[in-house]
Image (spheres, rainbow, N blue to C red):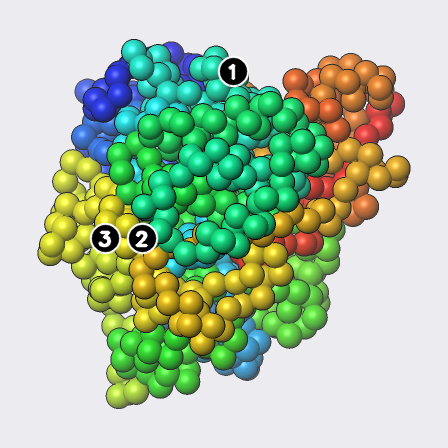
Amino acid sequence: MTDRSTDVWGTRTPHARDTAWPVRVDQHLDAVDDADVDRWVQSACVLCSNGCACDIAVKDGRMVGVRGRAGDRVNHGRLGPKGLYASWQWSDQDRLTRPLVRENGELVATSWDRAMSTIVDRSRQTPALGHGFYTSGQLFLEEYYTLGVIGKAGLGTPHMDGNTRLCTATAAAALKESFGSDGQPGSYTDIDSCDAIFLFGHNMAETQTVLWSRVLDRMHGPDRPQVVAVDPRSTRVTEAARATGGVHLAPLPGTNQALMNGLLREILTNDWIDTRYVAEHTLGLDELVTTVDEYPPERVAEICGIDAGDLCRAAEIFGTTERVLSTVLQGFYQSHQATAAACQVNNLHLLRGMIGRPGCGVLQMNGQPTAQNTRECGADGDLPGFRNWNNPDHIDDLARLWNVDPLVIPHWAPPTHAMQLWRYVEQETIDFLWISATNPAVSLPQLPRIREILSRPDLFLVVQDGFLTETAQYADVVLPAAMWGEKQGTFTNATRTVHLSEQAVEPPGEARSDLDIFLDYARRMDFRDRDGQPLISWKDPEGAFEAWKECSRGRPCDYGGLTYELLRGDSGIPWPCTAEQPRGTDRLYTDGVFVTDPDQCEDYGHDLLTGGSTTPEEYRSSRPDGRAFLKAAPYTEPPETASADFPLICTTGRIVHHFHTRTKTGRSRRLREAAPSVWVELAAGDAERLGLADGDRVRVESARGAVEGPARIGAGRPGVVFIPFHYGYWDAADGHEPDGSPTAANELTLSDWDPVSKQPLFKIAAVRIAKLPED
Ligand code: SF4
């Protein structure tokens, strides 16, 4: 096999529309041959939201390789560079092998008993509302559900969220606002059947490389789809748009909502709509028509800094192509008016009746591999099983299931979102903060502020991770966690496909699975139900999965028909999976009936402009009756724009060789060598004006902080700077904060968020750039 860190998407396997994506099995073994492998253990990759199925090669009790699973519906055998070169290569490097506690300012090794006793003693001294839990998009379903029950029925704290707030909160919010509930409508098989693909703020070529291989294989086939890309940068996706006769729209950061209103206006004024579908399956058309009428192409062109003809051409492709697939990701989710703009993508599909049919899906994507489970299981602000915190029947339902008083379950106000949770820590309302499998000291916005919060002297901070991350270095107690391949559990990808990941090897030293840690805490806290029985009765992953099945039964994410045994088959299985649909469900809403019944819906919705909540009474009186909402919002100017002091707009994002804060990918030799350090991308015109050449070291400053690195002169739009957000400090001299040459993009970003999804705005920091003196 070629070096896939450079040959990122591998060999093409072209195919025609409505034919199956051919199988291509990718494999990488480290210093062993096939014949040396003792056994292959079933799993799936956890380095992005795609969820590519794989087998882990084990030799002498160590992970030594990985290969794609040919029969799986997600990847048909393929793996990308991260899956091949960063799945296990971190496993025996500088791992945490013993618990640590802080003594006289230093973290020192201790026993599990002392570490857990310290946590439990402090927890018992802290009122329920003084507890905060900040988790991840990288644990397993069983771990999230257990954490959700601990928080919501054991302690009764609403202060729980995940770093999924940073990556997929808007996907969930947009699905709830339009369709009544979270749950991906479309399927990856839509790529095999579509005639056009619209990528809204989604650099799929770098963020989900195997999914992009699927698109490339259609592009190289006989009846290739046209690609339309919305992205202020120039990427492989925008190149594909040009190559297929599609369109690259490069709006100024923060103007997506104006662009979407312009596209919708063109669709409506040209009557490219499915009138019968709209009449029977949607409500809200009149307000949508009135709102978008204010956005003729010329006005949109001026706001967004694009060509009006390009906008019209993109609308024509959407309006006149038989089957259109749309995907949405961080260019929309992490920008201004995130939920509003993501909902307009749903609106485009609803207007054309393109939901629930082959080739016509919406993919409101996820960022992290198990983000879907954080949302489903109640480990973030949501209630388990997509239940509605504002519906007393849903609270009673959970209280019955858990056999607790309904009043224990926090539902007197909306759940605490991550940005508010961190504010509560800052204000000393939350004194006990437990962080699992995430690294906010690099991934949250405005890092100088986050470091101050983590340094609060009387904050009791628990960090549970596989490594001594930048965040763990602030902790009072550090718990060594088993990681992928070292524990068992399930997880669900961006298209609802559930995979079982088996334990392949023993965790290092005394490291324990996150599930075992949460169960130990629950046992020591002696959480009980109404009958005095232990609140949490399960003791292992499969027991937790069975309990979760009961929680999900009858809800949109019904796992009732799944078992570990079933998941040991050839392929992952997409929920809902029930007795009636024993092999799962490829796409949702095939009958045009949405989850908007007031008794079923996950949320009563919001005003997309202000975030104001719709009351239950208002919602009921709208009589949705299973119809989807065409939600509208005008464009507003972003909270931060270019100024005389800070004349450029910085967007942050991912690159192909790294994931998150490089905890795993930074420990892969190949990926580290392919992308060793931060860089600053700026447009050729801006570079010329600033007197910068490729490779010059520059300092980028916002009102909040600075980043330093070499300049890369790109082909992006003038006025826009891009910095990858992966580069923190764990591998730098100091280990947890900048030592004079800051590299974390979030030094620059601002603490502001979307009013509906509460997702932070990572894409619109105003900055200035200056050349640094040569050494
Ligand atoms: S596309 Fe994502 S899930 Fe698939 S191998 Fe690459 S990183 Fe892993």
Circle 3 sits in a helix, a strand or a loop, which is it?
Answer: loop
Q: Nearer the viewer, residue 294 or 253?
A: 294
Q: Earlier in the sequence, mark 1 or mark 2?
A: 1
Mark yes or no: residue 768 visible. yes
Q: Quadrant of residue 401?
A: bottom left
**Mark number for residue 280?**
2
| Residue 659 screen position, x and y as percent | 50, 36
Secondary element under disc 2, as helix, strand or loop, is helix
Residue holding disc 1: 242
First in sequence: mark 2 or mark 3? 2
Q: Local crowd at mark 2 within 10 Å, few (<14), some, or many (≥20)?
A: few
The amino acid marked with disc number 3 is Pro
Residue 576 - label: 3
Q: Secondary structure at mark 1?
A: helix
Task: Judge left or right: residue 223 versus residue 331.
Answer: left
Kind of residue sitting beneath label 1: Arg
Q: What quarter of the picture does the N terminus occupy?
A: top left
Residue that appears at 32% across and 46% down: 277
Q: Position of residue 734 (x, y in %)?
A: 70, 42
